[in-house]
Amino acid sequence: MVKNRRFEDVEKGPGLGIRHVQILILFCGMTVTYALRVNYSVAIVAMTDEKEAREGFEKFDWNEQTKSLILSSFFWGYIFTQLPGGHLAQRLGAKMFLFFGIFICSLLTILTPWCASVGGWKLICGLRLIQGLCQGVLFPCTHALLSKWSPTEERGVLNTLCYSGCQFGTVAMLAVSGMIATSPLGWPGIFYVSGAIGILWSIVWYIFGASNPAECRLISPEERKFIEDSLGHSDDTPKHYPAPWKKILSSPPFYSLLIVHCCHIWGFWTLLTEIPSYMNKILGMNIKSNALLSALPYAVMWLLSYVFCFTADGLLRKKVLTLAVSRRIFNTIGLGLPALALIGMGYVTKETTSLAITLLVVAVGLNGAIYLGYQVNHIDLAPNHAGTLMGMTNGLANIMGLIAPLAVGFIVTEENNPDQWRIVFFISGGVYLIGNFVWCIFGSTQVQPWNAPKHIPHQKVRRESAFIEAMEAHG
């Protein structure tokens, strides 16, 4: 019986294989898409500040409210393609949805400087909205791909490796964008470089990517059999389980997951979009040091996500923690401790720059623990509907990504006023604490009864959640 299997008893499959190539390409895809998201955070400083970047490039007289509107406009489109993107990717295959999403987004990124010059902030907002529509399929499609390519025994590690590209892309873009803005390319170079890399990735994905092992011409029969056997596939296994919408929408664990996801996105995107402006206006840093230091917290988050992953795996293997306790501990590390750091940031000044940087590193870096907390809870609750659940919670949660920058623009009417920035940090810290509390109290790591229809033979759906059940049994 699967439920009695121990970690050390799980059958080992082929070593490095095509599944790892797929994960590597997806890691690069995450890197590219997050670079395409955060490039505005630094570029908008160079586009609007006469003292920054190179002379000879057009500058725009945009106030903080207008800049917040531009930064938030991405999410106007992003939230609408989450659920349909995941549902269609699950039914029709995720490869082409992901290809067109990133390709179109990259092309529009290259056109950004021209759009800014011709249409100003209004055209930029429209362009960002379309980019959001394109990127809305990213997480649901990636979840769908991982569900097909990740053997249950390797799911935790492969998921972490894939999604760590989010932080790597953030780090890379924040680190180099300041240097690009002060180079002969000027601030338009930020968009040209990131857009070109996105188009290159799209070509690579079109050639080598595949929606599942059965469609991949490069995979060996042995590796394909290992993956499909691990996931419990057979000739009569249903390709798609109908989503139990009514049961999902009446599930308390689902709502606790939705709340914590919303709270995390509020704080995360507030920091991601506003850190460059905060460092420039409050801490008095120029754009080059601003970009490099803005990247530091996300570099720490990227590295710590691996540390947390293997630490959690080791604790579970040694039966030190149950899965439920592990999820809550790491979620508290990822949200509770950063909340305290954000509250502390409300009191730093230009004279305590080192303390501000330290608190930023803590607030963002420890966020890496959420990959072992609520972020994988979609798979805990319903392995057969993980993509759908991710589309639902990520779509609704990213409304917070739209509201948060607008809230900053409403609160921060004087960019050099530290008291107004203090309110921003207090709100973000409080939201983190509320989200973590709700999920720790009302969340669940048990596979839900609505995971599969009752008429489906139990042994066929059990293996799809073997990794989760094995951890529970081992704990």
Image (tube, rainbow, N blue to C red):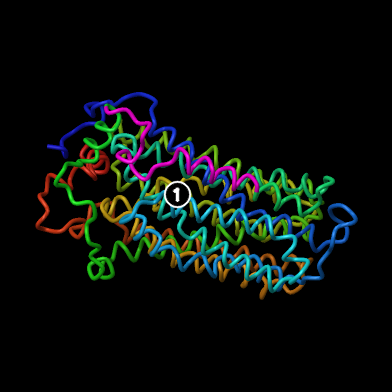
- Secondary structure mostly seen in magenta is helix
Relative side of 367 to 50, left or right: left
Query: Does residue 183 lie above or below 395 as drawn?
Result: above
Whole-percent x and y of residue 187?
78, 54
Query: Does residue 424 lie above or below 107 as drawn?
Result: below
- The residue indicated by pointer 1 is 370
Between 410 and 455, the residue placed more toward the observer is 455
Q: Where does the N terminus fall, quadrant-wise?
A: top left
The stretch in magenta equals 196-221
Q: Is 191 in the magenta?
A: no
Residue at position x 44%, y 55% in the image = 97
Which image quadrant is residue 155 in? Answer: top left
Q: Is 203 in the magenta?
A: yes
Residues packed near mark 1 inside 10 Å, few (<14), some (14 to 19) or many (20 plus): many
Residue at position x 60%, y 65% in the image = 426
Whole-percent x and y of residue 30?
52, 46
